[in-house]
Image (cartoon, rainbow, N blue to C red):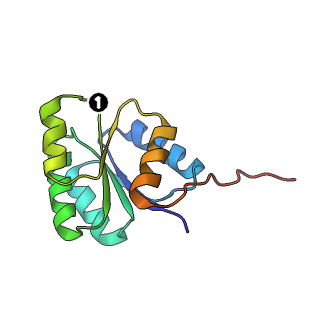
Amino acid sequence: MSISAIIIDDNQDAVELFQEYLEVKGIDVLGVGYNGKEAVELFLKLRPDVVFIDVTMPYYDGFYALEKVRKLDHDVKIIMVTADSQTHQKKKIFELNADAIATKPYDIEDIVDVLEKITNQRVSPTSLGSNS
């Protein structure tokens, strides 16, 4: 059984690259969004296993999305993504009940380790178009 996810980040290039990384690792990326409001809308529509949310975004930020998604589903796994390592920000993330924090720039193997820990599922890469 594959893990499904959505990715929310205001940087479209970062979203595309992260989506490719996850898909190579066998994660089913159901959708992407670019602000906290889209995170909530996509979550309601797609109901993924895991939500990756960037903390710092204009308009509706990651804290908005984390709080709203958590109220909609207490059990969904939420990984907050941030380039900011300030202690007060991490404290707020965990007060809002995120399951994990991934620090940018992230290592995909670290992301896989976190996914396996919080979902209790093994992440295995897909076979990439082998013709043998």
Which residue lies at the image location 27% right of the left edge and 57% below the top edge? 39
User: Mark 1 is on which residue type?
Assistant: Ala
Residue 2 visible in the displayed image:
yes
Taking 57 as reference, is 120 above or below it? below
Q: Residue furthest right?
A: 132
Which residue lies at the image location 65% right of the left edge and 54% below the top edge? 126
Nearest the eye: 70 or 33: 70
Residue 60 visible in the displayed image:
no
Which residue lies at the image location 42% right of the left edge and 37% below the top edge? 13
Badge 1 element: loop
* Total tally of numbered discs in the picture: 1
Image location of residue 90, percent across then percent down: 19, 38
Which residue lies at the image location 39% right of the left edge and 64% below the top edge? 49
Q: Which residue is mark 1?
A: 83
Image location of residue 64, percent across then percent down: 14, 52
What is the quadrant of residue 6 in the picture? bottom left
What is the quadrant of residue 82 in the picture? top left
Taking 29 as reference, is 74 above or below it? below
Taking 72 as reference, is 61 above or below it? above
Nearest the eye: 49 or 19: 49
What is the quadrant of residue 11 in the picture? top left
